[in-house]
Amino acid sequence: MNIFHSLFLGAIQGLTEFLPVSSSGHLVLFQNILGLSKGSLAFDIMMHVATLSAVIAVFWKELWSIIRHPFSKITFLLLVSTIPAAIIGFTFRDFFERAFSSGAYLGFCFVITGIILFYADRSPQRVHYGKDLSGISYIDAIFIGLAQAFAIIPAISRSGSTISAGLVRGLKKEFAIKFSFLMSVPVILGPAIFDIKNLTSTMFKEIGVLPLVLGMFAAGITGYLSIWFMLEFFSRANLKVFSYYVFALGSLIILDQLFFNFVFK
C-alpha cells in the first residue's frame, strides 16, 4: 500500500463512516478496485480508530459528562445498545472476516442499506413521537443495538441502520443521530483493543508506518467534517437522499459480480 492509497482510502473511510452509506462497504469496494488485499482488515480497523477521534472531538462534552457521571441513564443506554454487536461480532467473527476479505455480498448489502434508509423516512413513529434522552427506553436501546449488530456486515451502514432504527422507535432526528454517533465509541474501541494485539506484528510490515499514519490522519479529518455535515444536513433533510445513492451503487456492483467481473474477479 502506497501513500496515495492510504490517503485516498483514509478519506473514503472518514467521509462514509458517518454518512449512512457504509464506510466498510466502500473500503472493501475500493480495496478491490485498487487490487489491495494484504493488511486490508488491519487497515480497516485502524481507520475506524481514526474516525473515533473525530467523534471524541465533536462530542467531547457529552463523553466527558458520561465519564464524570458513569451511572447516568445515557451510560447504561449506551452499554445496553452495545451488547448485541458484542455478542454477534464475537460469535460470527470468522464469517465477518471472510465477508471483509471477499466482498461477495457487497452489492446485495448496499441495496439492503438503501431499503433501510428508504423505509425509515416513512416510519409512522417518527411523525407521532419525538423522544429524546428523557423518553428513550432500554427496549429502544436494544432495538437500535440490534440494528448496529446487523451493520457489522460490510455495506450495511452502521450509522444508517442505527439512525433508521432510532427513527422507527420514535426518536427525534437530532437525538437519533447523536445517539448513533455516541454508540460508535464502544463498538469501535472494543474490537480495536481486542484485535490490535494480533495485528501489530504484521500491520506495519504489510501497510507501512507512513501510509498508516497518513491514512489515519485523512480519516480523522474527513470524519470530523462528515459528522458536522450530518448534524447540519440531517436536521433539514431525510435519509431518502442517501438511499438513491446506495441503491445505484449496489446495483452496479451486482451487475459486475454477475456479468462483468471488472472489480470482483
Image (cartoon, rainbow, N blue to C red):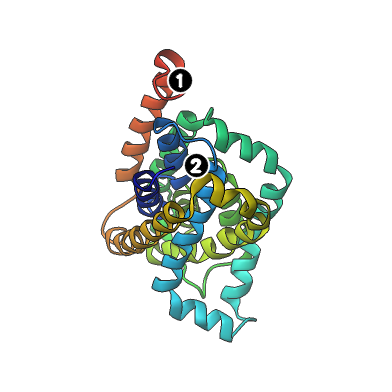
Determine which residue is flagged by label 2: 156
- The numbered dot on residue 257 is 1
Q: Amino acid at mark 2?
A: Ile
Q: Amino acid at mark 1?
A: Gln
Structural crowding at the residue carrying mark 1, measured as other residues with C-alpha within 10 Å and reported as few (<14), some (14–19) or many (≥20): some
| Image spot of residue 73 (x, y percent) | 60, 77
Label 1 residue SS: helix
- The numbered dot on residue 182 is none
Q: Nearer the viewer, residue 63 or 103?
A: 103
Query: Given the current orientation, which residue lies at the most extreme top position?
Result: 259
How many numbered discs? 2
| Image spot of residue 56 (x, y percent) | 46, 71
Q: Nearer the viewer, residue 109 or 116?
A: 109
Label 2 residue SS: loop
Residue at (44% x, 37% y) in the render: 31
| Image spot of residue 77 (x, y percent) | 60, 69
Side of 170 where 227 appears, left or right:
left
